[in-house]
Image (cartoon, rainbow, N blue to C red):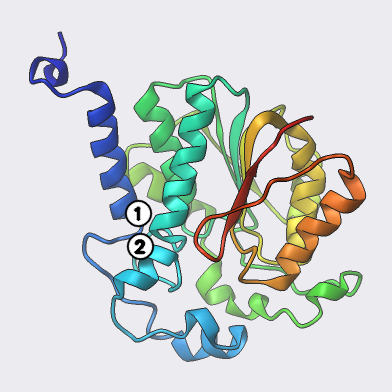
């Protein structure tokens, strides 16, 4: 008899305790790090103010909604989008939806680390977490994609370009760097079409731009299993991102109805009904 069961603690309770703690550490509600002070003015200029214009101190409401760029935390997606990710991964494991976990655009790796933690908490050894990123920030806008013509996120490379080695080390800190974690380095247009991913149970897109979102959808969406989750991180934050989603569904999945659900006023998700 295991220690937890002997003490009257159920397996689910132990899982919840572990995953609650992992979430709170990954978004750093534990030590409450402030937004990035040195780049606040630059980020405000690049992004036009709005949701990233924050006081230079920890704000629990902003951190809950993923509306600041943490100086220390390993994820900027906030509590509500973390909870949505937990719902998605737990659901596909419990319901036997086949496929791997994929995130395109990972920053410091926090969301991918959380997916690996959730799989570990279930003892799921037959799924891989794919960590897909350039690890060099965002690309300059391609003139072929009109929706990206005014995008300036590439100028924030000093903030957004986290090396593959640093992300891998972040996994290692939590004891979660193993053979169920695979890295796919490069621009999405080059890496995703030939990615050795057979089936996807959770697809989380955080590429910000129209092209990055479209490249990921074209290469990976057909691999999402029925019952699998599709999560779009910046759907309401960036018009180019939501436009790519609707252009893709209209032009390449015209017979599919995506029941898009809200997460926190920024991100959305839906469950794929057919393949």
Give the quadrant of the N terminus: top left
Say which of 39 and 227 sits in front: 227
Identify the residue under disc 1.
Answer: 26
**Secondary structure beneath label 2:** loop
Residue 31 position by quadrant:
bottom left
Identify the residue under disc 2.
Answer: 73
Where residue 107 sits in the image (x, y, percent)? 52, 60
Where residue 271 sits in the image (x, y, percent)? 64, 39
In the rendered image of this protein, does residue 176 appear above or below residue 148? Answer: above
Question: Would you say the residues marked 2 and 1 are in contact, meaning their CB atoms lie under 8 Å apart?
Answer: yes
Residue at 55%, 30% (x, y): give it: 128
Say which of 192 and 48 sits in front: 48
Give the quadrant of the C terminus: top right
Where residue 158 sits in the image (x, y, percent)? 53, 75
Residue 187 position by quadrant:
bottom right
Which of the numbered marks, if any, corresponds to residue 245?
Answer: none
**Residue count near mark 2 (Cα–Cα under 10 Å), binned few <14, some 14–19, many ≥20:** many
In the rendered image of this protein, does residue 256 appear above or below residue 23? Answer: above
């Amino acid at each position: 008899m295991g220690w937890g069961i002997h003490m009257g603690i159920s397996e689910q309770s132990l899982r919840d305790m572990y995953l609650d703690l992992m979430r709170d550490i990954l978004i750093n509600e534990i030590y409450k790090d402030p937004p990035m002070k040195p780049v606040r003015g630059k980020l405000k200029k690049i992004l036009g103010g709005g949701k990233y214009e924050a006081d230079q101190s920890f704000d629990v409401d902003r951190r809950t909604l993923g509306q600041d760029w943490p100086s220390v935390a390993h994820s900027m997606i906030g509590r509500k989008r973390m909870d949505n990710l937990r719902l998605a991964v737990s659901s596909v494991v419990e319901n036997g939806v086949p496929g791997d976990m994929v995130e395109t655009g990972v920053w410091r790796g926090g969301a991918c680390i959380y997916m690996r933690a959730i799989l570990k908490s279930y003892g799921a050894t037959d799924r891989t977490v794919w960590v897909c990123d350039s690890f060099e920030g965002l690309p300059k806008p391609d003139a072929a994609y009109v929706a990206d013509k005014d995008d300036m996120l590439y100028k924030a490379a000093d903030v957004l370009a986290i090396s593959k080695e640093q992300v891998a080390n972040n996994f290692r800190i939590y004891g979660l760097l193993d053979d169920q974690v695979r890295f796919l380095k490069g621009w999405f247009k080059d890496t995703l079409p030939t990615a050795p991913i057979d089936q996807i149970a959770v697809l989380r897109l955080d590429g910000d731009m129209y092209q990055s979102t479209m490249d990921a959808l074209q290469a990976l969406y057909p691999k999402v299993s029925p019952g699998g989750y599709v999560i779009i991180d910046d759907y309401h934050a960036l018009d180019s991102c939501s436009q790519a989603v609707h252009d893709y569904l209209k032009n390449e999945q015209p017979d599919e109805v995506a029941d898009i659900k809200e997460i926190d006023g920024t991100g959305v998700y839906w469950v794929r009904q057919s393949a």
